[in-house]
């Protein structure tokens, strides 16, 4: 039935919501992109006090008819901030269409809150999001222009040809003394800056290729509109990755070791890439970079074998040489301060330091064994690690998942690690049902919030749930993967959709030089880092956060806020691994 008496109040409240200051949250927070018909569907409502009774809720279609009504959950405190909230569960609404959610006080039926968010229910709601998250890497390409029709409205000139890169004194050898010029073009800019880092690139390639193996049929048919889309024998997703893999090959020195990064001495200002003039260096060979390179190249050799035999051979040889170098240099760590005390020019760009490389050895050996089946890579292959989520500085879980997904190779160890994954997820899934005001297995404790938590915390937890679902078939894991995506797309304490260009309140001012300098505005498809209570930029760059901000709201959609609003390739890879994994199941 229609509720005409509510329509004027709804309109007024919508006007108020639209004129809220940028740092104010929405009264109703939910997935701003859409739901599949049979997906769980919930929204989080801000209320005034913990003793407020459950609100009534109505969902209206585009003609004002009520198509669903229900009662919100009892009021719950946000386990991090303590703020009172309720949950509306409208999963029973499965008819495709666009709707508006209205919330009413349960005592007097007065409209308390409304929202300018529209509920969209339809087939394959995350296909375009997946495509944009992958196309973000095309926009990150160094050494080439992004041109139409491939740029899709965000064209820019080429920057950083990187065909005259200097060998930094820290990387000098007899064969390549300091100042030697080498060519190292291509690859992706790592983040909001213009540098290229092997440690992070290797991790990104690992997650990328694992996502492909999990959903080959899906990715084989996903068209990205990139220059290589005309290569009929290679799926677009693998063609985009090849642009970065070929750059990585140029970072291997003649002795097999791999340079830690390719960088200017200090970060460029916020200027377009074609305006950059600082000299570029390859800096220091390290054990972590070399092992990450070995692991990702071995994995690439296996994945690309059906498509490109020449590349497979090259990648295999490169991976073996890198691993051999690491065995001879097992403890060469990147210490930027110590390096700067010894060599000039000083380097002050991203460090990616890692002084524990047992996990990198484990991952490299795993990938080399899965590729070659050579016994030298399978001697004592299964070290004991406390199970924890993967990140660029902790890659043991990537190896663990590889054994789980290749149980014939892993044997009993695959079963053991699967049990550890499920045990690790158990408490998070319980929290989603019992204490989470966002019905999510992420964001329910202070430790969930840190630099890059949207990716390494939320998206990756969803990816872990997708692997658990593939291993067990248990629907709870699929549902919780979707809940993690709901959080990213708006059902969170800030009310932001954390992906540029998507949703009704997206991240729009990321710490991203390519977006800041693009004449067409912010490039879509990038994941923002997310709430970060450490607020490292508050002191160094004078970024002003609201006072006494709790961990789950320590976020600013503000270009200078690199601590909460930067973008990176390793974060975006977890975003599309999650969205594609969910979309493929649909």
Image (tube, grey):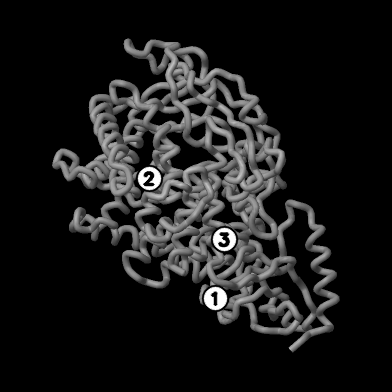
Q: Position of residue 409 (x, y in %)?
A: 19, 54
Q: Residue at x 57, y 46 (%)?
A: 529
Q: CA distance from mark 2 to mark 1?
A: 33 Å
Q: Position of residue 429 (x, y in %)?
A: 44, 66
Q: Of the numbered discs in the image, which one, if any, rests on residue 487?
A: 3
Q: Quadrant of residue 533?
A: top right
Mark 2 surroundings within 10 Å by alpha-carbon count, few (fewer than 14), some (14 through 19), many (20 or more)? many
Comes first in the chain, label 1 or label 3: 1
Q: Kindly report the distance in space between the C-alpha atoms of the residues bearing marks 2 and 3.
A: 25 Å
Task: Decide if residue 333 is in sight here.
Answer: no
Residue 217 position by quadrant: bottom left
Relative image position of residue 23 (x, y in whole percent): 73, 52
* Mark number, residue 206: 2
Residue 37: numbered disc: 1
Closer-to-camera residue (189/39): 189
Q: In the figure, is residue 130 to the left or right of 73? A: left
**Which structural element holds mark 3?**
helix
Q: Choose the circle earlier in sequence order: 2 or 1.
A: 1
Residue located 71% across and 74% down the image? 100
> Relative to 378, does residue 468 appear above or below in the rendering?
below
Please tell me which residue lies in front, 78 or 140.
Answer: 140
Q: Is residue 29 above or below residue 156?
A: below
| Marks 1/3: CA–CA distance | 18 Å
Q: Does 162 sit left or right of 45 as displayed?
A: left
The residue at 43%/24% (across/down) is 335
Residues under numbered marks 2 and 3 in contact, where contact means CB atoms less than 8 Å apart:
no
Q: Position of residue 184 (x, y in %)?
A: 44, 25
15 in relation to 349, above or below: below
Circle nearer the viewer, 2 or 3: 2
Q: Earlier in the sequence, mark 2 or mark 3?
A: 2
Residue 546, visible in the rendered structure: yes
User: Between residues 72 and 74, which one lies in front from this camera angle?
Assistant: 72
């Amino acid at each position: 039935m229609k509720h005409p008496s509510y329509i004027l109040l709804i309109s007024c409240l919508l006007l108020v919501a639209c004129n809220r200051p940028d740092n104010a949250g929405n009264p109703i927070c939910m997935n701003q992109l859409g739901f599949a018909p049979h997906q769980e569907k919930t929204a989080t409502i801000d209320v005034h006090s913990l003793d407020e009774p459950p609100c009534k809720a109505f969902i209206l279609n585009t003609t004002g008819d009520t198509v669903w009504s229900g009662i919100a959950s009892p009021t719950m405190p946000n386990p991090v901030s303590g703020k009172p909230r309720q949950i509306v569960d409208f999963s029973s609404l499965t008819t495709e269409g666009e709707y508006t959610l209205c919330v009413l006080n349960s005592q007097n039926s007065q409209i308390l809150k409304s929202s300018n968010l529209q509920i969209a229910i339809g087939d394959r709601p995350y296909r375009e999001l997946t495509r944009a998250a992958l196309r973000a890497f095309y926009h990150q390409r160094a050494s080439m222009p992004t041109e139409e029709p491939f740029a899709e409205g965000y064209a820019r000139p080429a920057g950083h040809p990187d065909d005259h890169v200097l060998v930094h004194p820290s990387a000098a050898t007899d064969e390549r003394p300091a100042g030697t010029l080498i060519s190292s073009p291509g690859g992706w800019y790592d983040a909001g800056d213009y540098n290229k880092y092997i440690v992070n690139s290797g991790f990104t390639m690992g997650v990328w290729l694992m996502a492909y193996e999990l959903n080959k049929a899906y990715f084989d048919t996903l068209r990205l509109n990139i220059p290589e889309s005309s290569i009929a024998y290679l799926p677009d997703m693998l063609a985009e990755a090849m642009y970065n893999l070929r750059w990585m090959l140029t970072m291997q020195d003649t002795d097999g070791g791999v340079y830690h990064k390719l960088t200017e001495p200090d970060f460029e200002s916020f200027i377009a890439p074609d305006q950059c003039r600082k000299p570029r260096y390859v800096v220091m060979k390290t054990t972590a970079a070399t092992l990450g390179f070995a692991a990702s190249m071995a994995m690439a050799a296996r994945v690309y074998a059906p498509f490109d035999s020449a590349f497979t051979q090259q990648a295999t040889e490169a991976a073996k040489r890198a691993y051999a170098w690491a065995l001879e240099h097992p403890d060469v760590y990147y210490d930027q301060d110590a390096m700067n005390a010894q060599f000039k020019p000083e380097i002050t760009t991203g460090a990616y330091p890692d002084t524990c490389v047992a996990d990198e050895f484990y991952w490299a050996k795993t990938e080399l064994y899965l590729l070659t089946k050579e016994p030298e890579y399978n001697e004592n292959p299964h070290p004991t690690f406390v199970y924890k989520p993967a990140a660029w500085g902790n890659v043991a879980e990537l190896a663990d998942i590889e054994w789980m997904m290749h149980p014939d190779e892993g044997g009993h160890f695959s079963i053991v690690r699967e049990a550890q994954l499920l045990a690790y997820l158990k408490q998070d899934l319980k929290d989603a049902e019992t204490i989470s005001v966002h019905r999510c297995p992420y964001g329910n404790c202070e430790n969930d919030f840190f630099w890059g938590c949207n990716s390494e915390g939320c998206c990756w937890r969803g990816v872990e749930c997708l692997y658990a679902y593939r291993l067990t078939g248990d629907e709870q894991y699929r549902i919780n993967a979707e809940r993690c995506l709901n959080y990213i797309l708006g059902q969170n304490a800030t009310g932001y959709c954390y992906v540029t260009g998507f949703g009704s309140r997206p991240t729009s001012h990321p710490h991203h030089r390519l977006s800041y300098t693009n004449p067409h505005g912010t490039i879509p498809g990038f994941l923002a880092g997310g709430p970060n209570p450490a607020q490292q930029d508050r002191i160094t760059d004078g970024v002003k956060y609201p006072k006494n901000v709790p961990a789950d709201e320590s976020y600013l959609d503000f270009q200078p806020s690199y601590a909460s609003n930067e973008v990176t390739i390793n974060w975006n890879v977890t975003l599309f691994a999650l969205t594609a994994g969910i979309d493929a199941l649909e």
